[in-house]
Image (cartoon, rainbow, N blue to C red):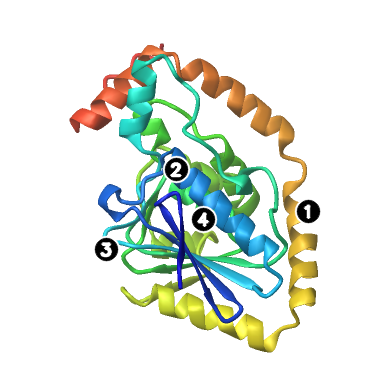
Amino acid sequence: MAVEFHDRVLFEKLGRVAIITLNRPDRLNAFDSGMYEGMNQALESFRDDPDLWVAIIQANGDRAFSAGADMNALDANAANGITAALGGLILDDEMVTNKPIIAAVHGHCVGEGVNLVLGCDMVFADESANFMISEPKVGTNAVDIPIKLAKKLGYAKAFAFLTPGDGKDSQWCAGAGLVEVVTAKGEVKSEALRFAQRLCEESGPLAIRAQKETLWRTVFEDEHIAKEKGTEMRASIRVSDDYAEGRRAFLEKRKPGFKGS
């Protein structure tokens, strides 16, 4: 039986596999404060349960894994002088758990959806998946995403992914090294589950955890200066005219007129 966190995220146990499901399909699983809190609680529940060995992060709805940050919520906050982010993922700053986490992606995976995927250890995507970093198109910058992309893809591929923010399909992402397995449309969840069950049945869980911890600490533990600089620059961008124009253009579905100020 599934538990629901903040009316946004479902958490279900299937043997030794945790199924974590973004469950806001009416908003294309966009991240508001409740989604952040629900996802973090689900990740902590997986981490703290000794009977669970592998987690899969997936999403409900036909159109999107996640449309990213909820722009309506961001715009409402900005109108009230609030420029802070709507929340944050605990995967941004720490490993959270040395147990493996698999992403199963379909449809649109935008902004914060990509950030969540980058916090996972292995990515399955069906042929409908389209990954996009939308922040530059609304006049702001991502912070955690460039750090993780550089670590996982290398500088050139990360830059191509980020700039100018066009969508990348599953095959491009597989070639770049973000996606490990591309499935037929509609089969990504079942394929990810099949792999998760193989991990539980064929590999020693302590060995898998030791390998993940060694990999993660080797790759990610020197990112703090980059994050501090990106966060500092985003704070100034969030009060700029360009960011206000970017939000309005996004909500009005038109091309923005950025001025660099």
Residue under label 2, please give it: 34
Front disc: 2 or 3: 2
What is the distance, in whole Å, between disc 1 and disc 2 at their CAs? 30 Å
**216 or 167: nearer the eye?**
216
Q: CA distance from mark 4 to mark 3?
A: 18 Å
Q: Nearer the viewer, mark 4 or mark 2?
A: 2
* Residue drawn 46% across the image and 20% down it: 83
Callout 1 amino acid: Arg
Q: Position of residue 250 (x, y in %)?
A: 26, 31
* First in residue order: circle 2 vs circle 3: 2
Crowd around label 2: few <14 · some 14–19 · many ≥20 (10 Å): some
Residue occupying the point 72% across, 30% down: 225
Mark 4 vs 2, N-terminal side = 2
Residue at horizontal 72%, vertical 63%?
98
- Of circles 4 and 3, which is in front? 3
Classify 10 Å Cα crowding around label 1: few (below 14), some (14-19), many (20 and above). few
Element marked by disc 1 = helix
Camera-near label (3 vs 1) is: 3
Please identify the quarter of the rendering in which residue 214 is found. bottom right
Residue 157 horizontal/vertical position (percent): 53, 49
From this viewpoint, is residue 38 visible? yes
For the residues labelled 1 and 4, the Cα–Cα distance comes to: 18 Å
Q: Position of residue 40 (x, y in %)?
A: 57, 50
Q: Which residue is mark 1?
A: 217
- Of the two numbered discs 1 and 2 on the same chain, state the one appearing first in sequence: 2
Please give the residue where the numbered disc 4 appears in the rendered image: 117
Q: Residue at x 32, y 60 (%)?
A: 107
